Image (cartoon, grey):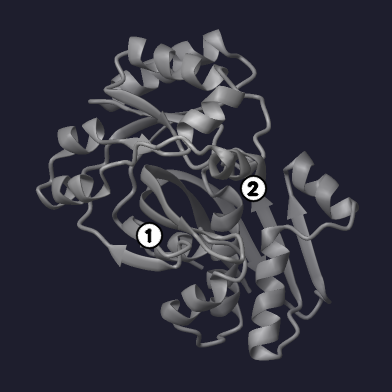
């Protein structure tokens, strides 16, 4: 039997840090939005398959595997094994479209898809609520990736409040060919004793309730952006390029380095993406949109 799952990217419309716990984790208030950009996963189980096989088209993930490192897909599988006591004989195939280490939760989305996929394939009977509870052990973004859509995320990311969906806003993402260490970004943020400007999360929640996309766009903000931008000025350069290409606003997602921009039309977004590809031919660039309607999975 083979079943299929899509793992959708996310962006942070608003990202604020409101505290730090003794264990080093940060308390956040974030408004997160799923994009229509996804990785594709298949899960196959039959009498000829023994153990776990993961096949990917990603050189990075393949190198991790050959080096003995577990990616989040394997961690999700091990978590389900601990929860259920079952051994899984399964072949997992991953087609990677979301940029890696980009602030788009690609790995978290793959883990969430794995939890959903194995739950279905092996009829484990775990509810979405239970999957979210388990998934925070893998990473703070994984519970949101199980839920999807538009959510307020609090705590370390596991406390989710589903919000009224916005329109399918045309969006362009651009990941420069640089590596950003999330740990280094948070360390720099923590060590900066200057007073910080906090995003207006409550204002954005009100704008979402009023279905005011223009106001939401105006309030886009990421408290980590000044830190990452200081380390990598190309982020600011990309934002300026996107605005010059008719974006309404451009900001960084997560701890970076991906920049995203919102547009009035899909045509404008596609034109901007094409222009950006000619300017930055080695960057990963996609025209996409907000994804709010949950589509049925298939098998």
Question: Which residue is painted at 69% across and 72% down in the image?
Answer: 77
Q: Which residue is mark 1?
A: 153
State the image coordinates of residue 274 (x, y, percent, origin top left): 46, 15
Tell which of 171 and 29 is nearer to you.
Answer: 29
State the image coordinates of residue 20 (x, y, percent, origin top left): 51, 58
Tell which of 139 and 154 is nearer to you.
Answer: 154
Do the residues under discs 1 and 2 have CB atoms within 8 angstroms? no
Q: Which residue is mark 2?
A: 95
Quick check: 147 above or below 61?
below
Q: Residue furthest bottom?
A: 85
For mark 2, does the 10 Å Cα neighbourhood hold few (<14), some (14 to 19), or many (20 or more) residues? some
State the image coordinates of residue 266 (x, y, percent, origin top left): 30, 27
**Circle 2: element type:** strand
Q: Quadrant of residue 262?
A: top left
Tell which of 261 and 236 is nearer to you.
Answer: 236
Quick check: 22 above or below 125?
above
- Label 1 and label 2: CA atoms lie apart by 28 Å
Q: Residue furthest right?
A: 67
Question: Which residue is painted at 23% across and 53% down in the image?
Answer: 165
Q: Is residue 153 left or right of residue 93?
A: left
**Circle 1: element type:** strand
Question: Which residue is painted at 15% across and 45% down in the image?
Answer: 207
State the image coordinates of residue 193 (x, y, percent, origin top left): 50, 39
Mark 1 or 2: in front is 1
Question: Which residue is painted at 79% across and 65% down in the image?
Answer: 53
């Amino acid at each position: 039997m083979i079943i299929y799952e899509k793992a959708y990217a996310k962006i942070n419309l608003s990202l604020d840090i409101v505290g730090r716990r003794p264990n080093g984790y940060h308390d956040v208030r974030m408004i997160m939005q799923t994009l229509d950009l996804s990785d594709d996963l298949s899960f196959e189980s039959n009498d000829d398959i023994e153990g776990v096989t993961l096949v990917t088209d990603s050189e990075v993930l393949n190198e991790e595997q050959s080096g003995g490192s577990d990616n989040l897909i394997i961690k999700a599988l091990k978590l389900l094994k601990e929860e259920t006591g079952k051994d899984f004989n399964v072949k997992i195939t991953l087609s990677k479209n979301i940029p890696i280490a980009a602030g788009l939760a690609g790995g978290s989305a793959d883990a969430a898809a794995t939890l959903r996929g194995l739950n279905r394939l092996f009829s484990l009977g775990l509810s979405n609520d239970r999957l979210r509870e388990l998934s925070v052990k893998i990473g703070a973004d994984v519970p949101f990736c199980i839920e999807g859509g538009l959510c307020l995320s609090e705590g370390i990311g596991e406390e989710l409040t589903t919000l009224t969906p916005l329109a399918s806003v045309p969006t362009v993402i651009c990941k420069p060919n640089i590596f950003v260490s999330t740990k280094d970004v948070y360390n720099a943020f923590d060590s900066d004793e200057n007073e910080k400007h906090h995003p207006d999360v409550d204002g954005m929640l009100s704008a979402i309730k009023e279905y005011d996309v223009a106001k939401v766009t105006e309030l886009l903000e990421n408290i980590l952006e000044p830190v990452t931008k200081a380390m990598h000025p190309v982020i600011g350069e990309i934002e300026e390029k996107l605005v010059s290409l008719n974006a309404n606003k451009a900001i960084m997602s997560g701890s970076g380095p991906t920049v995203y921009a919102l547009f009035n039309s899909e045509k404008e977004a596609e034109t901007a993406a094409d222009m950006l590809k000619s300017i930055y031919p080695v960057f990963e660039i996609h025209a996409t949109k907000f994804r709010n309607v949950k589509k049925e999975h298939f098998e």
